[in-house]
Image (cartoon, rainbow, N blue to C red):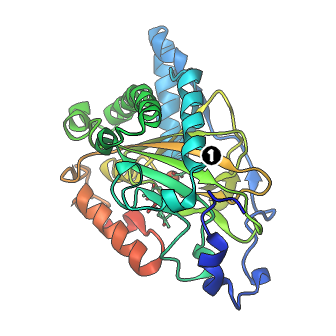
Amino acid sequence: MDLHEPPFLEAYKTLLHGTNLNDISNYKSSMVDKCEIPLIDLSRLNFGHLERKECMKEIIEASRKWGFFQVVNHGVSEEVLKSMKFEQMKVFRMPFGIKSQENFLNLPSRSYRWGNPSATNPKQLMWSEALHMFLPDLAKMDQHKSLRSSVEDFVKAVTPLAESLVQILAEEVNIKFSYFQHNCSANTCYLRLNRYPTCPFPSKVVGLLPHEDSSFLTILHQDNIGGLQLMKDGNWISVKPNSQALIVNIGDLFRALSNGVYTSVKHRVVAAEKVERFSVAFFYGPSIDAVIESNATPPLYRKFTFGEYQEQTLKDLKEGGDKVGLSRFLL
Ligand SMILES: C=C1C[C@]23C[C@@]1(O)CC[C@H]2[C@@]12CC[C@H](O)[C@@](C)(C(=O)O1)[C@H]2[C@@H]3C(=O)O
Ligand SMILES: O=C(O)CCC(=O)C(=O)O
Ligand SMILES: [Fe+2]
């Protein structure tokens, strides 16, 4: 028995008991299209005026139509990505008895998450574990210097990337970049390390349930295993891994702020079949008191604070086992 694996089977015994796995839809079914999401070469932002404009247009178009795109020449070094992966593998290899302890890594409770403790039916079971870190809490990880410094280096490298993309997107919808400078900082963002262990029935249980992100924008680094899918025109589409690229997606907060001009798209991860999978997500978001309000008329969403959004998400998760998201704030 692998000591580091969370006890999924034991935890899910009751929900799985009496469930005919054949009655659960097949996640790996043929309904999944293989399709490339837009791939944008960011080096053009630093070339001449015309190339910069062209690149900005692609970023804006992808955020409107897809809510998802990949970027290359993003400025995040291979070394930073490699060291993040190394530390991520190391921390998830720790015994489950340690990972699941209160105060693991000196982080607040619920920083280490596994499966879906609130699942109310077998369709809500998830075969994954995550370290969900609020960046100000990194300072508490003084006993785990190498993990902390890899996370810090990663964050330091992706933050300017997130900021430059947000600035381009904000200008297009007449939002001042100062709104983001005022509300977002290294003390308001989150970093999530995901691990998808191999699952004995991968077509029946999902790795990560469908959701939209609780951010303005997310930057995701995935390894070469594959499994990320996004919803496009009513179909699930698989995102082919590209070792040179980072994935960017619009979160619910930018969708609301732009009054739906930019779209936050549902995505999920299928459970790993033969090889475990890792990913890292950087959520660029504001402080809890930040007000999310579009000045467009008519507004699609009511004015809310990020704190309210988080509270609602937690409530929905506890009560229904799943995130409802931005539709809670529709007018
Ligand atoms: C069961 C769930 C946990 C999760 C919300 C969800 O319904 C589906 C995905 C999970 C996720 C992934 C992205 C974010 O890190 C997160 C906070 C979110 O909004 O959706 C997490 C949620 C979580 O870990 O609590
Ligand atoms: O693992 C992935 O590819 C996606 C992870 C994700 O969607 C998230 O952490 O919000
Ligand atoms: Fe996500």
- Residue 128 appears at what percent x and percent y? 60, 60
Residue 9 rendering spot, x and y as whole percentages: 67, 74
The reply to whether residue 328 is in sight is no
Where residue 315 sits, quadrant-wise, is bottom left
Q: Is residue 13 above or below residue 64?
A: below
Q: Quadrant of residue 25?
A: bottom right
Q: Quadrant of the C terminus?
A: bottom left
- Residue that mark 1 sits on: 278
- Left or right of 34, for residue 173: left
314 and 171: which is toward the camera: 314
Q: Is residue 188 above or below residue 126?
A: above
Three-letter code, disc 1: Phe
Q: Nearer the viewer, residue 248 or 315?
A: 315
In this rendering, position of residue 10 left or right of residue 33: left
Residue 102: percent from left, percent from top: 38, 62
Number of numbered labels in the structure image: 1
Q: Nearer the viewer, residue 183 or 250?
A: 183
- Residue 46 percent across, percent down from the top left: 46, 12
* Name of the residue lying farthest toward the top: 48
Q: Is residue 144 above or below residue 329?
A: above
Q: Residues within 10 Å of mark 1 (few under 14, many from 20)?
A: many
Q: Secondary structure at mark 1?
A: strand
Residue at 60% x, 64% y is 6
Tell me the quarter of the image containing the N terminus.
bottom right
Residue sitting at x 76%, y 81%: 21
Q: Which residue lies at the image location 72% right of the left edge and 56% below the top edge?
A: 272
